[in-house]
Amino acid sequence: MASRSVTMWRPNASSVDPPPRLLKLPPGAVTTAADEAIEFAERALGIELDAWQRWVVEMALSERADGTWAAFEVGFVCPRQNGKNFVLEVIQIACIYLFGDATLVHSAHKFDTAVEHFGRLKWLFENTPELSELLLPGDASFVTSNGKEHIRFNTGQRILFKTRYRGGGRGFTGDKVFLDEAYDLPARAIGALIPTLSTRPMAQVYYTASAPHEDSAVLHAVRNRGIADDPADRLFYAEWGNPDGVDDNDLVAIRAANPAVAAGRISEEYIQQEIRTFSGDPDLVDEHRRERLGIASMPVGAGDELIPNWSELVDAGSKIDTHRNIALDVSPDRTWAAFGWAGRRKDGGVHVEAREHRPRTGWVLEVGVKLWERWQLPIRIQTGSPAASFIGQFREVGVDVDEVSVADHGQALGQFLDACANDGLGHVD
């Protein structure tokens, strides 16, 4: 196998056209092994990557100072036919040929999709001289038993192809696990998978998909972590898409969600015909908005139905000038918690944001203490709410708490909605 080299990491998306709308970079990345993977793909495989694809490979294969991968989880989301699978091919082949991973697992929610990826890799290994040296005699490297497709090499390495049904994620463990079509990924698959990777120091989990559906629980959870941008979270997340509220026919918005348009692989003439094809029926329009504009379908109860103009209140320059406040809320089932920020802007309006929004509650006390040490502001918590369990905990560690009554909370909500309705509020999306 080829020796491994490293070069300096490029930690931004300035060269990507269009840049991702949502971006979470992995922490502590100082070098990358990606250049070798990209060079091999372009020289030996004939795969010419777009700028955004090269950048995703660089981020996914960025390393920490100790040589381990900076990102334990890698997620990249964009509409169909933009070339996500080319990125997976480059990374998977590099993991086998350059990096020596013993077992890779590629899964999809449909058998046909997994088999299609199997066929593409089979062709590349058979028709690339360097890769063909890894193959067993005859056709013995390619096992095509229904449901047990895999590629095995004379080095003992394997690439397994799985579909996600019934048993969820049982048998998915490997050095790298690629969860394609992650919008259809059951939570039980992750519950079965993640613990099995704990003894693999170079393990990674990849999530690739078009925009999430309402019931894409796992993908929404990954996406929310990307938005929360916890600096300690070993997650790389990039999403090309649009906020709800954009015009269905806006070609600028379509270009922003589809890097392949800028690369010239999807023509605007085709996009304009596609708009006509998906017109005339609400369900077709919804499909177009998710599958081409990259607009996420939010879970029931998580959308902005209460505030119809929420997307119109986006202001990239909005920030707090005075009267900063911090509040904590916890969902009734305690699967999510968030610290919210609010304050007055220079124009007298209100700025709001969810500064921290993460799964479960084990992190709340530590983050609350850091916020108190940084700002010396009491944390507002509604009495009788699920978050009220933290009132005593915060006070025990010296954090000041401002208890908010149900009546005060109701009054504040009314003021909040009035500010939204009268364009007196801003947020950064």
Image (spheres, rainbow, N blue to C red):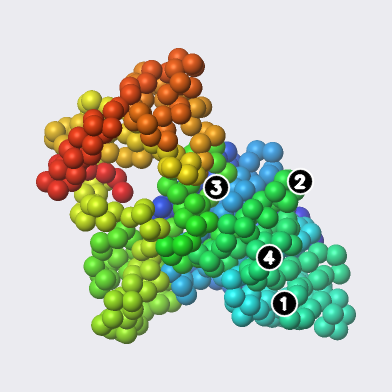
Q: At 33% across and 55% down in the image, what residue appears? A: 303
Q: Name the residue rendered at 42%, 62% in the picture.
A: 214
Q: Which mark is residue 235?
A: 3
Which tag is nearer the camera, tag 4 or tag 3? 4
Q: Are marks 1 and 2 in contact (CB under 8 Å)?
A: no
Q: Are marks 2 and 4 in contact (CB under 8 Å)?
A: no
The amino acid type of the residue labelled 3 equals Leu
Give left or right: position of 162 versus 424: right
If you read the primary sequence from the N terminus, does the residue marked by circle 4 or circle 3 appear first? 4
> Looking at the image, can residue 93 be seen?
yes
- For marks 1 and 4 on the same chain, the one whose residue lies earlier in the sequence: 1
Residue 294 coordinates in the image, percent (x, y): 38, 65
Indicate which label's residue lies in the foreground, 1 or 4.
4
Kind of residue sitting beneath label 2? Thr
Give whichever of discs 1 and 2 has the lower sequence position.
1
Few, some or many residues within 10 Å of mark 2 (<14, 14–19, 20+):
few
Q: Quadrant of the N terminus?
A: bottom right
Front of the two marks 3 and 1: 1
Q: CA distance from mark 2 to mark 3?
A: 19 Å
Q: Which residue is mark 4?
A: 167
Give the mark nearer the N terminus: 2 vs 4. 4
- Mark 2 or mark 3: which is in front? 2
Q: Earlier in the sequence, mark 2 or mark 3?
A: 2
Mark 3–mark 1 Cα distance, whole angstroms, equals 30 Å
Looking at the rendering, which quadrant does residue 401 occupy? top left
Mark 4 packing: few (<14 Cα in 10 Å), some, or many (20+)? Answer: few
Picture disc at residue 199: 2
Q: Residue at (40%, 71%) from the top-left corner? A: 291
| Marks 4 & 3, CB-CB < 8 Å contact | no
Q: The residue under label 1 is which amino acid type?
A: Gly
Q: Which is nearer the N-term, disc 3 or disc 1?
A: 1
Give the residue number, with chain letter if any, for mark 1: 147
